[in-house]
Amino acid sequence: MKKIINKKTYDTEKATFIGEWDNGESPTDCLDYIQEQLYMTADHEFFIHGRGGARTAYGRYVGFDSWAGGQKIRLLADSTARRVVRKHLPEKYHELFGEKPLYEIKDETGETVDVGSWEQISDAWKATKANPCVKRRFALWEEQEDGSHRLRDEAVGEGYEEYEKEELKNYFALNLYGSGWRADDREELQYQYNFTDREVETLCEILEDIEKNEE
């Protein structure tokens, strides 16, 4: 497939295929299945060739209140391409964007806010650190040589700790306690659920309180 964008042709047959992924739906589900492929041009530009069913972003209107599956090409900005590769093809990141360590800024839900080398995201992190949003938490992660990530810094907004404790109690602690987890299971909890040090410390405090109240 090919498409002209800003008077330039992007062609899947001439560009370099980088990798592909899908949305986890069954390929036999013709309505909701999505498959996307990443390509790189000779000028080091990235684009996605995606296809999907009628109920996806690739669906197309065919008239008479009817929709069908479709396909399209989307050109990616460099920052977007980096996020896409980091999310779907992490093993390709250093090959495509160099050997500098990758940094990610994530919010309290684990959603990536920004990604790139330190030179690319340092200004964004410094601004976040200087003035974090109320009841929000942002974390700076550094990619290690083995592909793991190390927490480098945190930016915690006013009121977040109280908010976090309430959220952990309502959405995790009660269910964990009911499943047999206790405050003494700190290391295993952190391993199983990838909690941060502060999250697991808060959870264990809540689990201990629940256990005392049960006695």
Image: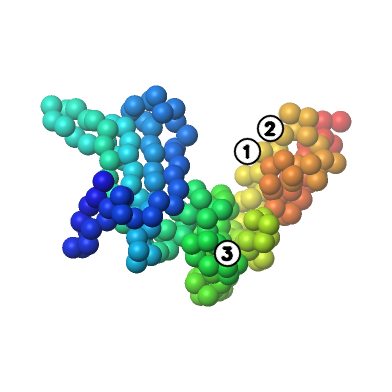
Q: Let me know if residue 93 appears in the view.
A: yes
Foreground of the two, 170 or 180: 180
Q: Distance between the residues labelled 1 and 2?
A: 7 Å
Residue type, mark 3 in image = Leu
Q: Which of 91 and 34 is in front in this view?
A: 91
Question: Where does residue 20 sit, x and y in percent of width and height?
Answer: 44, 44
**Please, is residue 159 above or below residue 121 in the view?**
above
Amino acid at pointer 2: Asn
Q: Residue at x 79, y 41 (%)?
A: 188
Residue holding disc 1: 171
Residue behind mark 3: 102
Left or right, residue 160 beside residue 113 = right
Q: What residue lies at 19% left-to-right and 34% top-to-bottom?
A: 61
- Specify whether residue 209 is in view: no
Q: Residue furthest top?
A: 28
Which residue is rendered at x = 34% and y = 27% of the image?
30
What crowding class fits label 1: few (fewer than 14 Cα within 10 Å), some (14-19), or many (20 or more)? few
For numbered disc 3, what is the local secondary structure?
loop
Q: Which mark is on residue 175?
A: 2
User: How was the colour assigned to the protein in this rendering?
Assistant: rainbow
Tag 1 near tag 2, CB within 8 Å: yes
Of the pair 38 and 74, the residue shown nearer to us: 38
Q: What element carries label 2?
A: helix
